[in-house]
Image: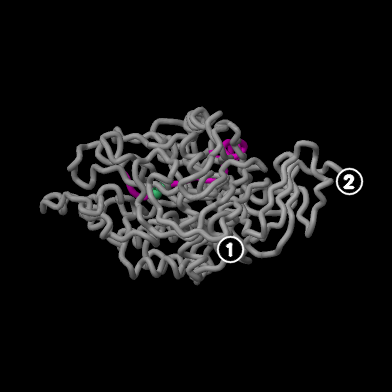
Amino acid sequence: MSHAFDLIVHDADIATATDRYRADIGVKDGVITAIARALSPNDLAPGGQRIDAQGRLVTPGGVDSHCHISQPMSDGSVCADDFASGSRSAAAGGTTTFVPFALQQRGQTLREALAAYHRSASGQSVIDYAFHLIVSDPTDDVLADEFDWLVTQGVTSIKIYLTYDDLKLSDRQILRVLAAAKRSGIMTMVHAENFDCIEWLTEQLLAAGITEPMGHAMSRPAAVEREATHRAISLAEIMRVPILLVHVSAADAIEQIRWAHGRGLRIYGETCPQYLFLTEDDLALDAGGARCICSPPPRDRANQQKVWDGLANGAFEVFSSDHAPFRSGTDGKAVAGPHAAFNQVPNGIPGLETRLALLMSEGVNAGRIDIHQFVALTSTQAAKLYGLHPRKGTLAVGSDADMVIWHDAVDFTLTQAMLHHAVDYTPYEGMRLTAWPALTLARGEVVWQGEPGRGQVSERVGRGEFVPAKVSPMAQVPHRPGASHHWLPKT
Ligand code: DUC
Ligand code: ZN
Ligand code: ZN
């Protein structure tokens, strides 16, 4: 067969979540159509492209399943990245699919929330995207009709909160949401922190005159996360439905996940770079304080080690950025003034572009995890959990040609000036890294090429498409003889 491919990636050292081998990758119309020892250049269509990977490592493009892009904020601050800047930044860091959150504000239907988010994404993204829906107002109508409708729209995952005044759900509401999610096959992500504890501790801290950023960590000790994690697991157990605990920060919460596994429950976990590379010391004023405020807060070195252990030993399925981008100024971190109390600082840090390089450098290259775990954690498992696999998350015949060709040997100091996000800082400034994508291919198109701080990122905003998610088998509870919930009402 001639002219079979419009792209051949030659001599790739392919690593997936399970396999590693040397081969050529043939691509037609953005899809991988052949992986073979040697593909003939004669099979390249006229005008087709041949990229010589020169035996370098090639992994599936990153799937970042937790990021906040153009999300409306209730405190007057602005989410710095829109789909254009966020997706370009992601591409430069090797991520080829991202899954930000469409926010249901109270009083809104899910239809309205989703339509608004499609409007902000449409024609703006360089990489493909899917959506999760944040459910903050689970009315009877939402639960009875809109969950099933969401699935028809290719949105098969939601996020719920146990904290934040304008987002939190009661236990009763959570049970109802989980029942509806189960019926519709939707994966539920849970932000697990105890609202009342945070509120009360915050009042005490402010009354004691502790207003600086460190107060943020003091108002959210590990027990706040542990209690809410346990509660979320218990509610999921009662409803016999899987959930995924997002941005797990500490040993205590990991123990709860392990406890759930021991009981045979299908509980998934996600962690993020900030829990590996930051500690509460980064909240000190002289360390830039407010810039590192995120929730849950960074912990200490012992907890960092437990999070690394969890990545290595299977406590976590996914490693996402939780990119929540706020500039340092009055449209962001300083929205309530440069010296505002910690509880008036928007929560979140940037991380879309640095996620893969951080984990490749300090995880794989430093010998803490292997390359297959890296791929599983940064790409494959997210695609599986959220119904995007096998189109996304792997390198296989029939999958989209989304991949990263890694530099063979780099060693550099990360600086904000190298990055493409719309935030004015990186919390990882000055870190020494030993990995960066040489090329990022998204559906066979080069969207990033270069070296750290010196490269070309695609300007073709709008080339990225919405990828409808399917119901994930991982959102289903495994069958257990004798366990039935047939008597439960629908919501
Ligand atoms: N939760 C998130 O998921 N992201 C940013 C801040 C937060 O509290
Ligand atoms: Zn959250
Ligand atoms: Zn988040």
Please state which amino acid type lies under the numbered disc 1: Ala
Q: Residue at x 53, y 44 (%)?
A: 91
- Expressed as whole percent of the image width and height from the top left, the position of residue 469 reads 61, 43
Q: Residue at x 30, y 50 (%)?
A: 293
- Expressed as whole percent of the image width and height from the top left, the position of residue 131 reads 53, 40
- The magenta span reads 147-164
How many numbered marks appear?
Answer: 2
**Circle 1 is placed at which residue position?**
483
**Circle 2 is placed at which residue position?**
1
Q: Is 288 in front, or is 241? A: 288
Q: Vertically, is 268 above or below 123?
A: below
Find numbered disc 1 in the image and state the secondary structure of the residue it sits on. loop
Q: Nearer the viewer, mark 1 or mark 2?
A: 2
Is residue 491 visible in the rendered image? The answer is: no
Q: Is 156 in front, or is 249? A: 249
- Expressed as whole percent of the image width and height from the top left, the position of residue 188 reads 50, 50
Q: Is 171 in front, or is 262? A: 262
Mark 2 CB near ligand 3 (8 Å cut): no
Quick one: which residue is furthest to the left in this view? 208
Please state which amino acid type lies under the numbered disc 2: Met
Is residue 41 visible in the rendered image? The answer is: yes
